[in-house]
Image (cartoon, grey):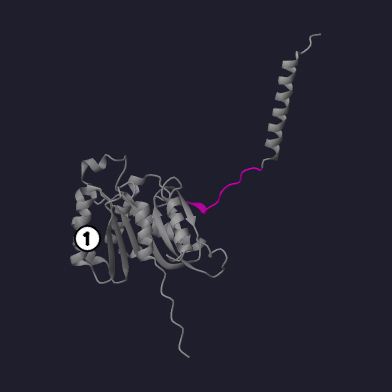
């Protein structure tokens, strides 16, 4: 029978000890747990003929109460791989430090983004950006007829609603204000893609604004250094300056230091502070 030489015997001992240590570490290390930041559910949409996923963030204080009701902020591009996480973070921080009123955030995850967020177009270049475009009217129907009622069933909400979006989602936000203004109370659009359909929506803004109804509305616009956005947004702000109904309050912030890719987060930070700032505390009644 052959014998192990001392160097080989030493190596075997080292390997056995190391292997045992690794095994012990694997056994004793606690298992990782999921990191939960909100809730998620799906709706089988008859309007759109597909299943849609919704992601929800509820600020601190809601779960601890049985009576607290909150307004709802809806956001297209609301998937976990889209804009939901960073907007939820803004809501958490701003509500936590008292710079913003608490809102329930409802992110609408995309299936066919360029279909849902665009209206019809006669521009051939527009039609080439996706297999299907021009579905914004159906997407609004989904929000009104299916999503909003479901959110009201699941959560304690007030009647106040808002919508936030950038780029094509910003286009959808502006289009909704001009075509169906009573769907939301507050509209926030960052670098809205108003170049769509040969800038038709912007060119019709003066006329469309006259159908904005009588209930109070707030519009908050932000634009970056993107030159493609500048002209149609300029048409819109000019129309707002000359033809805004008394029930619409609007803000526009130009952020030339930002690009189309970077504007969403800093614009949302500023917009939430402006349009969702906490309401003044009523003075105590005189005795």
* Image: magenta residue range: 30-42
- The verdict on residue 154 being magenta is no
Q: Position of residue 16 (x, y in %)?
A: 73, 25
Please, is residue 128 above or below residue 209 in the view? above
Quarter of the image with the N terminus in it:
top right
Residue positioned most to the bottom: 287
Q: Where is residue 63 in the image (x, y as percent from the top left)?
A: 56, 63
Is 50 displayed left or right of 178 in the figure? right
Is 42 displayed left or right of 117 in the figure? right
Return the residue nearer the eye: 169 or 272: 272
Return the residue nearer the eye: 139 or 243: 243
Residue positioned most to the right: 1
- The verdict on residue 33 being magenta is yes
Name the quadrant containing residue 6. Answer: top right
Please, is residue 72 above or below residue 246 in the view? above
User: Which residue is rendered at x = 28% and y = 68% of the image?
Assistant: 248
Q: Where is residue 181 in the image (x, y as percent from the top left)?
A: 30, 63
Is residue 166 among the parts visible in the rendering?
A: yes
Magenta stretch, main secondary structure, is loop
**In the rendered image, which residue does mark 1 sit on?**
237
Name the quadrant containing residue 7. Answer: top right
Q: Where is residue 11 in the image (x, y as percent from the top left)?
A: 71, 20
User: Which residue is rendered at x = 35% and y = 52% of the image?
Assistant: 264
Disc 1 element: helix
Is 115 displayed left or right of 72 in the figure? left
**How many other residues sit within 10 Å of disc 1, few (<14), some (14-19) or many (≥20)?**
many
Is residue 138 among the parts visible in the rendering?
A: no
Instruction: Please state the total of marks drawn on the protein image.
Output: 1
Is 271 displayed left or right of 79 in the figure? left
Return the residue nearer the eye: 237 or 160: 237
């Amino acid at each position: 029978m052959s014998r192990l030489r001392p160097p080989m015997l030493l190596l075997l001992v080292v390997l056995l000890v190391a292997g045992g240590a690794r095994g012990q570490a694997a056994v004793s290390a606690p298992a990782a747990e999921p990191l939960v930041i909100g809730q998620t559910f799906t709706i089988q949409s008859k309007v759109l003929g597909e299943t849609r996923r919704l992601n929800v963030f509820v600020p601190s204080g809601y779960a601890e109460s049985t009576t607290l009701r909150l307004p709802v902020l809806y956001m297209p591009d609301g998937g976990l791989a889209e804009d939901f996480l960073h907007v939820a973070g803004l809501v958490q921080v701003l509500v936590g430090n008292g710079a913003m009123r608490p809102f329930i955030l409802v992110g609408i995850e995309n299936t066919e983004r360029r279909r849902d967020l665009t209206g019809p177009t006669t521009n051939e270049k527009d039609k080439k950006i996706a297999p299907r475009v021009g579905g914004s009217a159906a997407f609004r129907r989904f929000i009104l007829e299916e999503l909003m009622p479901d959110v009201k069933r699941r959560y304690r909400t007030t009647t106040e609603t808002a919508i936030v979006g950038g780029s094509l989602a910003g286009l959808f936000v502006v289009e909704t204000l001009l075509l169906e203004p009573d769907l939301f109370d507050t509209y926030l659009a960052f670098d809205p893609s108003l170049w769509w359909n040969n800038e038709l929506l912007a060119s019709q803004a003066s006329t469309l604004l006259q159908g904005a109804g009588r209930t109070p509305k707030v519009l908050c616009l932000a634009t970056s250094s993107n030159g493609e956005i500048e002209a149609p947004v300029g048409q819109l702000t000019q129309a707002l300056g000359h033809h805004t109904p008394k029930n619409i309050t609007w803000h526009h912030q130009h952020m030339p230091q930002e690009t189309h890719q970077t504007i969403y987060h800093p614009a949302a930070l500023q917009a939430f502070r402006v349009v969702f700032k906490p309401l003044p505390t009523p003075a105590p009644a005189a005795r």
